[in-house]
Amino acid sequence: MTSQQKTPVNPLVVPFEAGSSPTPLRRLGHPEVLERWHAVDRTAHAPRIVAVPGEDGEDWTAAALVTARPHTAYLKIVDAIGDIPAAVAAVVAHARGRELAQVKWEGWTAGPEDAAAAGFAALSPPLARPEDVAGPAAGYVRWLHDSTVTEPPYYGQTTHFTCGAVTALVAQAHAGVLSWEEFDRRAELTLWRDATNFPACEPVGLGVAVRRAWPSSPVEVHLDVDRPVLLDHLSQSEQEWRAHLQRMSRTDAGRIGVPIAPHRLSTAAIRSAVGRREHVLLLVSLAGMQGFDVPHWVLCHGVVPGAVVVDDPWANAATGDTWVDAHLLPVADRSLDTMSVVSGFSGAVTIGRPQRSGAPSSRPADE
């Protein structure tokens, strides 16, 4: 039996402490890898070392640094050193023990052949990402269940405010309505310009902009309050004209046939929508995953046991978060339900499969 086929017995899992490395880890060498591990403060993503003890019980034969966004259902290998197949097998065993959905592996030092031998598939590289955000050129994923999740393109928003437009574009590229070649910064800013409430995209304006851009795609907005939203941080004078724009968006929605469901879209309903091959643009708070309560759009496009798979167009480089974390990201059902309450309300936009001209809608009633 080769080393990559072995299932480690009792892998050792210890906290990773910034600024120091355990002696057995230093003995494995690779100082350039350890330097990368300590280059950012990974504390917010619960960094751990998963090690394979040697026969003497003191030294390690292999080790991997693993992290993950809080309230998610995956582990990410930043790097593995020593007996790499054994280290990766230890991480997979650890993830299975925690009943997680997925293990990812950043491609800083991992190559496609090593990843494939360990059961990982290559992720498609990003179509775009901000120039000032570091990240590996490659990434890999291994699902720990039998479900199939098709991969959308990954596109990192190039501004702080275009997350809504990017999630809509990713949804349409995943559905085959938009070619990957057409998905660029011009498309990002063009859709944002039509959807923005300056600078944020609120649910109704985003739904209207999506329907205008793709008239054959059924669109429905879910918003459980009948008032302007995403304005509380602004002064009264700044709120007033943005509120007027939101009322205009509601008028536009009625004119072009975008229904506004006055209730929250539950996680069960998101699962049902994805099962119908629809895409859900979901407004979430980043408090759970990133530690600050900022509204943010993500795309829900897949489901696995116990989790909804999302694509997040933003990664927090300051914590070691990269596009590998944000892409094909499984979020536990209960956590997603909590994240979807933003400043006391919930908002989402569902995009259905394109319809032929004159074809009746087959959308069932919402759950």
Image: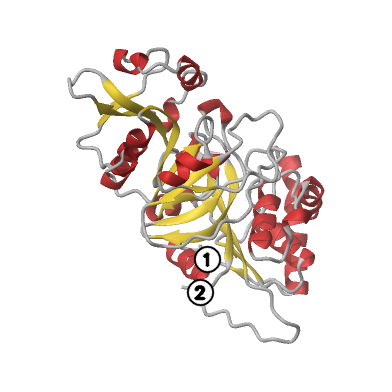
Q: Name above or below for residue 66 compared with residue 352.
A: above
Seen at 47% across and 48% down, the residue is 339
Q: Residue furthest left?
A: 56
166 left or right, relative to 3:
right
189 left or right, relative to 9:
right
Q: Name above or below for residue 23 compared with residue 187.
A: above
Q: Nearer the viewer, residue 31 or 196?
A: 31
Which residue is identified by label 1?
A: 263
Mark 2 surroundings within 10 Å by alpha-carbon count, few (fewer than 14), some (14 through 19), many (20 or more): few
The label number, if any, that marks residue 31 in the structure image: none
Q: Earlier in the sequence, mark 2 or mark 1?
A: 1
Quarter in which the N terminus is drawn: top left
Q: Are marks 2 and 1 in contact (CB under 8 Å)?
A: yes
What's under tag 2, amino acid-wise?
Asp
Q: Nearer the viewer, residue 212 or 7?
A: 7
What's under tag 1, amino acid-wise?
His
Mark 1 surroundings within 10 Å by alpha-carbon count, few (fewer than 14), some (14 through 19), many (20 or more): some
Q: Position of residue 238 (x, y in %)?
A: 75, 41
Which residue is identified by label 2?
A: 366
Q: Is residue 244 visible?
A: no
Q: Residue furthest front?
A: 1
Describe the element under mark 1 as helix, strand or loop: loop
Q: Position of residue 56 (x, y in %)?
A: 17, 20
Seen at 68% across and 42% down, the residue is 157
For the residues marked 2 and 1, what is the alpha-carbon distance in whole angstroms? Answer: 10 Å
Q: How is the image coloured?
A: secondary structure
Q: Position of residue 175 (x, y in %)?
A: 64, 65
88 left or right, relative to 238:
left
Seen at 48% across and 34% down, the residue is 291
Q: Is residue 236 visible?
A: yes
Q: Is label 2 or label 1 in front?
A: 2
